[in-house]
Amino acid sequence: MSIRQFIGQFINNHTETAESHYDERLRTRYYKTSKDKAMHAVESVLSSSGWKIKEAETGRGEVIAEPQKGGQSLLVATIVMVKPYRTAIDISCSSGTSLPSDFGKSKKIVVAIYEKLDKELPYLGTGMADEFV
């Protein structure tokens, strides 16, 4: 982790997962399931975690949610089936705050949702895109 990344994690109000993120907890997660089951699991986890589903676009594989109470956050989960029964899930979370930082709130939200999804779906691993090429 570079100094810029270290400082950036504290003065940021947005967290996004990626295939090769420097923080292993924020790497793209892969599950052994179909896209439809993953969409349903994401919607279920978000609803049970206090999020209101604004839109669920099955064709594009996106679920957009906002908190039912307490804050101006926006969460977008992207679900992509890379192979039969190999589905990738990426999450992006932004906190609407007047301050330049959410003090790690968006990162905690993403990590907590991934932990719940790991219990809900058969987890395969993180950052596995090279295996599917």
Image: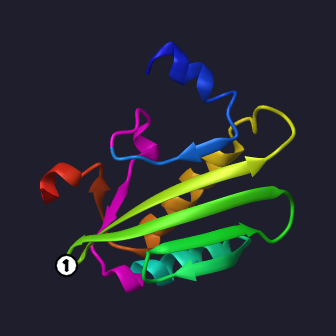
| Residue 49 appears in the figure | yes
| Residue that numbered label 1 is attached to | 84
Q: Is residue 100 above or below residue 89?
A: above
Residue 22 on the magenta span: yes
Q: Residue at x 57, y 80 (%)?
A: 56
Callout count: 1
Residue 34: x %, y % from top left:
31, 81
Q: Residue at x 32, y 72 (%)?
A: 122
Q: Write the start and end of the magenta stretch as one range.
A: 20-37
In this rendering, would 28 be left or right of 95? left
Residue 20: x %, y % from top left:
33, 40
Q: Residue at x 40, y 84 (%)?
A: 37
| Residue 44 appears in the figure | no
Q: Is residue 49 above or below residue 128?
A: below
Residue 62 on the magenta span: no
Q: Amino acid at mark 1?
A: Pro
Residue 39: x %, y % from top left:
46, 79
Q: Residues within 10 Å of mark 1 (few under 14, many from 20)?
A: few
Quadrant location, the C terminus: bottom left
Q: Residue at x 41, y 70 (%)?
A: 79
